[in-house]
Image (cartoon, rainbow, N blue to C red):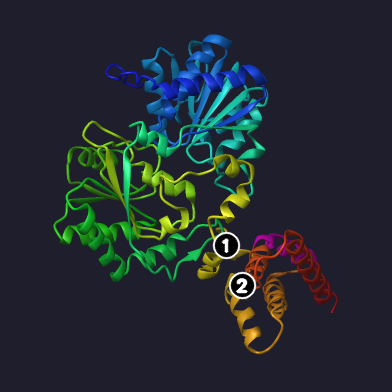
Amino acid sequence: MIDTDLYQAKKLYPFQETTVKQVLDEIRKNGTDFNLLYQLPTGGGKTVIFSEIARQYIEEWNKKVLILTHRIELSVQTSKQLFAIGVDNKVISSEVKHSNDQHDYHCFIAMVETLNNRLIDNENFIENIGLVIVDEAHYNSFRKIFQYYENCNILGVTATPLSSNKALPLKDHYNKLLVGESISNLIEKSYLANAETFSYDVNLHGLKIGSNGDFTISSSDVLYSNYFMQEKLIFAYEEVALGTKTLIFNAGIETSRRVEELFKKLKHNIRHLDSTFSDKDRKDVLKWFKETPDAILTSVGILTTGFDEPTVETIIINRATRSLTLYHQMIGRGSRRLSNKSDFKIIDLGNNVRRFGLWQDYINWQDAFRFPDRFLESRISEMEDMEFEVEFEFPKGFSKLIDTEILDSFSIKEAYFESMEKGLKGKKCIDLSLENHFEAIQKSAKNLDHALALQGILQDHIEHRIKQYTKCISKCTDNYFKYLFETYNRQLAQKLRLMIED
């Protein structure tokens, strides 16, 4: 049960009232089976806005509203705001197994995995839903729920309308993007605190890019745990942020714990927090952070969403990321404005500002929504791609199916440059890669069918290698990439068939 006795309803600002009207007008104009995506920067009050949309929707359409979140903290926060504005609602937590009382409520709030499990067992777990609101809509986990609500309106809200999976763009599920106030406008109108950014040039050599497109946690931990990077962090903190309430974002737990150890040795007031903490320990740490003026909290990922502590004065990005969404989420934790806080500081230790620009810079979100690939390519330069070794991470348990040591022993990038040094054609590395895949399959295959099945499960790895080759030869067209990929698979299959016949 959620305690709402002391919770005060947040009143809407003029721009928030305008947004509520715009969204409801879109639903009136387009009818059911219309999906709208709404963008607003972190700190702009998305929860307040979509709670009021839910209230007015229930009143006008006489249908129920379902709100999807991906963290229990967001569910509780939303439930409190809804109760405060007079909307009866129920949080569907993991403890809620049945919906016998669903007729007692007009609104339901659920974490996506919990609701999906209930809907698999019973498609009518919640009936008479007219509007589904998706908080943090850039996460792809929500899509599995959409099939159950095909005749409803879906409203997605996010600060960054870019899908967490490049292969599944948001434009495939939303008919239109409504762009809210920009960061600079919200600062100018005194809704958000302004940021002063301090960028420290760092050498990111050694970072590797994982299959998700971002730098791997393991390579980040190695780099950011070394002596020189730790020294740079301490120097930056003491130069810019000494004595301020500070949040430090790291890529891995190992780095964050090292940061805690180092700061404690220097008598700075610091604690570490990560996803392995119990609920009680987490609450204790956050209570300490809230009540301690010069507190430093070093963390991993867990505080990028669903965390609201307006008194934060400094954000330290002690990591590099290729995710514009994550970049904005981290900085947004410091953007809350108070009567005695009109600005905050950002310390960048990952060349992120060089990659994405300043937090306040204008971004054409309509372009990002309509042409996500082009939008991202314009920000992550090909020169940067070449600067880092791109590492393929095999799925868990993959080594039981095929000898991954054989596959890891070959680098198509190294093979390309070796071929060029010997005066051979660069494409020789494709032949060598194919031989490497053949060797790994041959060692594990029991027969031809098994060999071809192993080739099938290696498709992502084959695609990864060909992409590495095309980066070596400079950017190629989609058609040429497709030709290389299909030719590679055809030749590998022929080689496997000849192996079995021999």
Q: Earlier in the sequence, mark 1 or mark 2?
A: 1
Q: How dense is the environment of label 1, judged by Cα within 10 Å: few (below 14), some, or many (20 and up)?
A: some
The extreme bottom residue here reads 422
Q: Disc 2 designates what residue?
A: 407
Q: How many marks?
A: 2
- Quarter occupied by residue 8: top left
Q: Tell me which secondary structure the magenta stretch mostly adopts.
A: helix
Whether residue 127 is visible, yes or no, is no
The N terminus, quarter of image: top left
The segment highlighted magenta reads 448-460
Q: Is residue 377 left or right of residue 201?
A: right
Element type at mark 1: loop
Report helix, strand or loop for mark 2. helix
Horizontal placement of 384 versus 469: left or right?
left
Amino acid at dot 2: Leu
Tell me which residue sits at (47%, 61%) in the image: 216
**In the rendered image, the vertical position of residue 214 relative to residue 90, given as above or below:** below
> In the image, is residue 34 part of the stretch drawn in magenta?
no
Q: Residue, x 66% and y 68% (percent of image)?
A: 470
Give the side of residue 375 with respect to residue 498, left or right: left
Q: Is residue 200 or residue 464 the one in the foreground?
A: 200
Cβ–Cβ under 8 Å for marks 1 and 2? yes
Q: Position of residue 33 (x, y in %)?
A: 67, 24
x, y percent for residue 65? 53, 19
Give the residue type that dot 1 points to: Phe
For mark 1, what is the residue? 394
Is 450 a magenta residue?
Answer: yes
Indicate the quadrant containing the C terminus: top left, top right, bottom left or bottom right: bottom right
Image point (48%, 11%), residue name? 104
Q: Position of residue 330 (x, y in %)?
A: 38, 46
